[in-house]
Amino acid sequence: MGTIFRSEEMSLCQLFLQSEAAYACVSELGELGLMQFKDLNHGVNAFQRKFVNEVRRCEEMERKLRYIEKEIKKEKLKIPDYGENPKAPAPKEMVDLEATYEKIEGELREVNTNAEALKRNFLELTELREVLIKTQNFFSAHRHEMGSLVHDAQQALSQDEVGFAPQQSVQLGFLAGCIPREKLPAFERMLWFACRGNVFLRYEEIQQPMEDPVTGDPVFKSVFIIFFQGEQLKARVKKICEGFKAALYPCPDSPQEREEMLKGVSTRLEDLKMVLNQTQDHRHRVLVGAQKEIRTWIIKVEKIKAIYHTLNMFNFDVSHNSLIAEGWCPVRALEDVQMALKQGEKTSGSTIPTIIHPMKTRETPPTFFRTNKFTKGFQNIVDAYGIASYREVNPAPYAIITFPFLFAVMFGDAGHGSIMFMFGLWMIISEKKLLAQKSDNEIWNTFFGGRYIITLMGLFSTYTGVIYNDAFSKSFNIFGSAWRPHYEESLLEVPDIELTLDPALFFRNSTPYPLGIDPIWQLSDNKITFLNSFKMKTAVILGISQMLFGIILGIFNHIHFRSVLNILVEFIPEVIFLLSLFGYLVSLVYFKWITFDVSQASCAPALLIQYINMFMFKYTADGGDQKCNPQLPFYTGQQTVQTILLVAALACVPVMLLVKPFVLRSRHNKKLRMRGRLGAHSTDALIPNEIIGENSVSQKDISVNTEGTTTSLLPDDDFEDDFEFGEIFIHQVIHTIEFCLGCISHTASYLRLWALSLAHAQLSEVLWQMVFSLGLSMDIPWFGSVIVFVLWMFWANLTIAVLLVMEGLSAFLHTLRLHWVEFQSKFYVGDGYSFNPFSFKFVLDIESLEDIK
């Protein structure tokens, strides 16, 4: 837990791995998940790397597993997930895995091909049976109509052949088949127009749906029979049937032949159905066998592929038959890494030990925080703004308290907060069961990932709701009210009179409410006036306190990085500037609360006017009562104190603006003069460590990289002579302006705590009065309970949808802004990059259950 306050110390390590042990060592490091490797072959094409063939083999195995998984899901079999995490198999086991996957895939493809052929044959025989049955029924039921069809055909033929040969007897032919039901209207129109009405179409729908042999989807078809005369029309009808992909089937002319053919088709269908069932049973057995192992197979292949991808990032030393790797590792985890490497050596049977060598470098290390399931959500909020710079103060542990508290100040309602708290607590209690479901709903995963944040926000909102004495727009009256009415009876008899609550009159000799705000204010017409003053001052106090806390956190960065200059010319002037102007405003608020009571409300000073007069150096009032004027100073020596504070604040501006750039330039010039005295032939390695500074390195810190060239490991400030005074000065000007103006704008920005709290309370009150209270005010004997229940359901849904979800999201976003901009800008740089170690957990996207068990 200690490392969450500041990122862990990182070390750049160089590893020398023997070829036979490299795979097992990388596998152990993947299980450990504490090593981030650098790509030493970033200029090499992906197809020219050493282990590209192994990666291709893994991709081929992935393709086969995807096919097997698709077939399992197609069979509607559920793939069990027992949370297993098998070790990465040895390289020699890849052959056995490939053979297993090849066998299962080949068997499935063969079974699917045979099943598809059998289904297609079954479909054709089923359609042929339907054609025979429908045709037989048609000829049996329409014998008398056939004579009229022949007569109509003779009449049509005689009209077409006037003036030619004498009439002959007409011999009609017919074609029968099946066509999809949706194509039948277009098919009928095409026959009519193409054949000029000289064909006769009869059709009947098949009631039971057919199964598509490829997709398995249901297909609805119809049986048709077409009567025509002559070969020319027959050829034209066949072409039309081919165009509409209608299946034509042979249909004998005599009823006896149709009966015999129907019996034969029915027998073949029964035999084919038996073969299809056996094929389906065999396919099901193959898939059930693969179903139990598919999850383990996928994990193994993913691990093998990740290992070879990582090995492709290493350099290969041909002379020593070894692989050279570089990567970042936490200093605290070096022993764990060495143990993992030894375990890899033992697994591979290598006798040559793996060498791990910490290196010194000028590169900026990655940022790494050790988090758990509780702190992870708050760390993600901070990382969304920017990854912390290496070893700078982390805002996340402080956001654990400040984030839900500022949210609760805006959302303060004991009723709504209790609902939010119970929802978050339910997710925490049921997190193991909910996590095992592995939902794909992005919105739900977002809520579940922030379950601890939601729980704390609900708990803090319940507390602030008690302080505001507000629950669903109603107040608690636990300790009784301190209000004692003193209205005369004649005054109360005046019709339509509006009476406001005067604290000076009714609370003078009474005991104040023990906790929070007196419940009588909930019924007062001037409730908003009273609460506005209270919440606005509270928002200013909280905002200035958090900004001061952010500036104080900045000194821990200066101390850690040993920057005395930043302490003197940034931290101290910033604290003086903030306290002189805005800290003084907070002190005035407390001074007014302590000094003046309700009996002196008319003579109480106006803080806003007093604060404006401080900058205008105005300490007199024109006209009015000179003894009781809100514009006059209200304590002895106020003019002297305010003048000193204002001058001190203004004096801090040039200190923040000018001192640091000129001091840095003076140091740089001094360094150049020191190097000039050593002579033109001197090098950095000859400069004594006392002259260079605390970040110096000796000649042994010059390393040789993998390409054989030397690389200096001196820090940038120790060997770079370029110094851009203009850039540093402009940067300091921007920093000073942002801080000075930011103190003003950020203080005003914290007023959103007051504004959203007021909006939430008023919206809750309007929703109660406009919806639920209507049902409570109705005087209906028995039907009123139904109305109350309906209005309660409507009120409850609006409360959850509007006040909890929408208002909660609004308060969450405003709290996010207060932390990102107003708080973190005082000390947080956030220009680092995250530590992304090689870990099978991240490769497989597996949610760890160790903390939940």
Image (cartoon, rainbow, N blue to C red):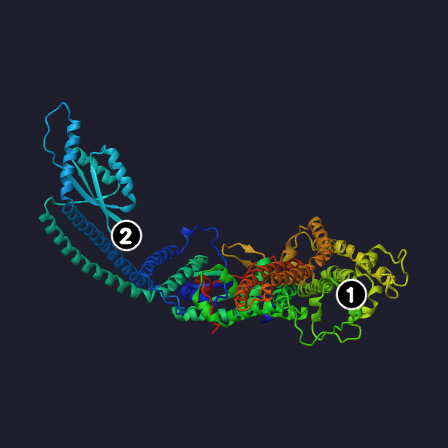
Residue 832 visible at all: no
Q: Give the quarter of the image for residue 393.
A: bottom right
Note whether residue 748 is visible.
yes
Residue 814 position within the rendered picture, expressed as x and y whole percent measured from the top left: 63, 59
The amino acid sitting under disc 1 is: Val
What's under tag 2, amino acid-wise? Val
Q: Is the residue marked by circle 2 packed among few (<14), some (14-19), or many (20+) residues within 10 Å?
A: few
Which x, y percent locates residue 792?
A: 55, 65
- What residue is drawn where x is 48% and y is 59%? 442
- In this picture, residue 47 sits left or right of residue 519: left
Q: Determine which of the numbered discs, if any, sits on residue 214 in the image.
A: 2
> Mark 2 vs mark 1: which is more N-terminal?
2
Snapshot quadrant of residue 275: bottom left
Q: Which mark is residue 589?
A: 1
As measured in the structure, the alpha-carbon distance from the residue carrying label 2 to the one carrying label 1 is 79 Å
> Considering the numbered disc 2 on the image, is that residue within a helix, a strand or a loop?
loop
